[in-house]
Amino acid sequence: MSLADKISFKMMSFYHETLYSLFRDPYEVLRAAGVTEGQRVLEIGCGPGFFTVPAGEIVGTKGSVNAIDINSIAIQHVREKVSKGPVRNIEVSRVDAADTEFSDEKFDLVFVFGLARSKGSTLGEIWREAFRVLKADGILSVEGGINPPEDLFERTDRRGRIDKFVKA
Ligand SMILES: C[S@@+](CC[C@H](N)C(=O)[O-])C[C@H]1O[C@@H](n2cnc3c(N)ncnc32)[C@H](O)[C@@H]1O
């Protein structure tokens, strides 16, 4: 773990955790993204995990959340957070979102918040992987103004900063 990695995580967690907690309600955002009870959910680029435990709470014991990030410091941080939290249906893995090794069509919903640039593979590769692991009638929810390619996904809804897509 380099010093640069540590500084970059501190900066991200200041914005995506400390500041977010002042003005964002993660439950409201996740509901706008389509997260509901019983779903199998994939969170791509969980960062410091502002949305991770709330997602686990919303999907409940009949659902599950896989939270992934390429940054090992983020993973350690989110694992600690999850271990102290109220739910046991969350798995946190360090993996490049373009090559997750999850089975085809595993997830009811995939959400990608705040991932403006990929630190590993290209965003194009991440969208293809999201398409592969999403069920035929699944939902892709994106925040941050980045759009998946139109040959893979079509937008169905926009609420605030959240865009919802289905498979094209
Ligand atoms: C700005 S943070 C957003 C954190 C969180 N989703 C939120 O909205 O609060 C973007 C995260 O995406 C992760 N990331 C970037 N490229 C990735 C990739 N190829 N695979 C997995 N995670 C990636 C970064 O490490 C970072 O933690």
Image: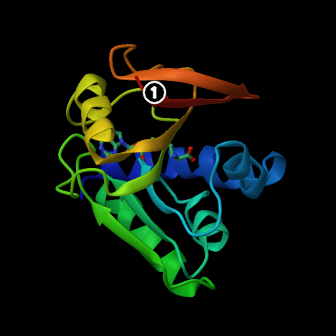
Q: Is residue 162 above or below residue 8?
A: above
Residue position marked by numbered label 1 in the rendering: 116
- Give the residue at the far right of this rendering: 23
Please provide percent x and percent y for residue 70: 28, 50
Q: Residue at x 62, y 54 (%)?
A: 35
Instruction: Give the side of residue 162 with respect to residue 129, left or right.
Output: right
Q: Is residue 104 above or below residue 62?
A: above
- Give the residue at the far top of this rendering: 150
Q: Residue at x 28, y 44 (%)?
A: 97
Instruction: Give the side of residue 163 with respect to residue 91, left or right.
Output: right
Please provide percent x and percent y for residue 109: 49, 50
Q: Secondary structure at mark 1?
A: loop
Figure quadrant of the C terminus? top left
Give the image's coloring scheme. rainbow
Please provide percent x and percent y for residue 13: 55, 52
Q: Amino acid at mark 1?
A: Ala
- Along the line of sight, the residue nearer the viewer: 96 or 135: 135
Please provide percent x and percent y for residue 25: 79, 53
Q: Residue at x 55, y 21 (%)?
A: 155
Residue density around tag 1, few if under 14, some if 14–19, many if 20 or more, within 10 Å:
few
Q: Is residue 60 above or below residue 110?
A: below
Please give the count of numbered marks on the rendered protein: 1
Figure quadrant of the N terminus? bottom left
Q: Residue at x 52, y 45 (%)?
A: 12
Q: Is residue 136 above or below residue 143?
A: below
Quarter of the view holding residue 162? top right
- For disc 1, does the CB lie below 8 Å from ligand 1? yes
Q: Quadrant of ligand 1?
A: top left
- Along the line of sight, the residue nearer the viewer: 37 or 90: 37
